[in-house]
Image (cartoon, grey):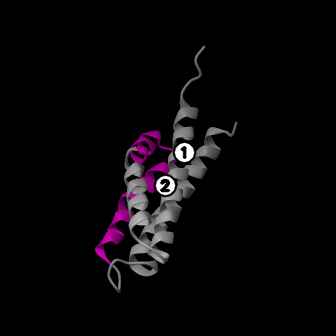
Amino acid sequence: MPSPNRWRRAFSATLAALALLELLWELWLAPLRPGGSWLALKALPLLLLWLEVSPARPRAAQWALLVLPLYVAEGVVRAWSESGRYAVCAITSTLLALVALASGIAWVRSLRPSPG
């Protein structure tokens, strides 16, 4: 089983990648309006959480695990309702959010003391 530090690094990396994708998605890759949209601000909570998760703060990870399902839901809805590059961005966002959820849960669970 990977060490807690490995799970934390995976969680931190996927949070950063998801924040970057969300920003690029709404500004250049597939914005709702030509020239970008205010939806790019949805990357801000991820960036703030990433800044706290990177130095290994489990409380920030718990907050991120509460927020990430919103990004999964948005990705699923937009992947279902849009087509072309819009859907590709949505599917990629959903997959990154799911990987972040899984690695975050694994990290937080690995920090618990073992029973016995």
Dot label at residue 97 = 2
Amino acid carrying mark 1 in the image? Ala
Image position of 77 with respect to 7: above or below:
below
Image position of 105 with respect to 78: above or below:
above
Total tally of numbered discs in the picture: 2
Dot label at residue 28 = none
Upstream in the sequence, badge 1 or badge 2?
2
Furthest-right residue in this view:
1
- What residue range appears in magenta? 37-65
Which residue does the image show at 45% across and 74% down from the upper left? 83
Q: Is residue 47 left or right of residue 32?
A: right
User: Residue beneath label 1, please?
Assistant: 102
Which residue does the image show at 48% across and 58% down from the upper left? 94
Residue 48: say if magenta.
yes
Amino acid carrying mark 2 in the image? Ala
To which quarter of the image does residue 66 belong?
top left
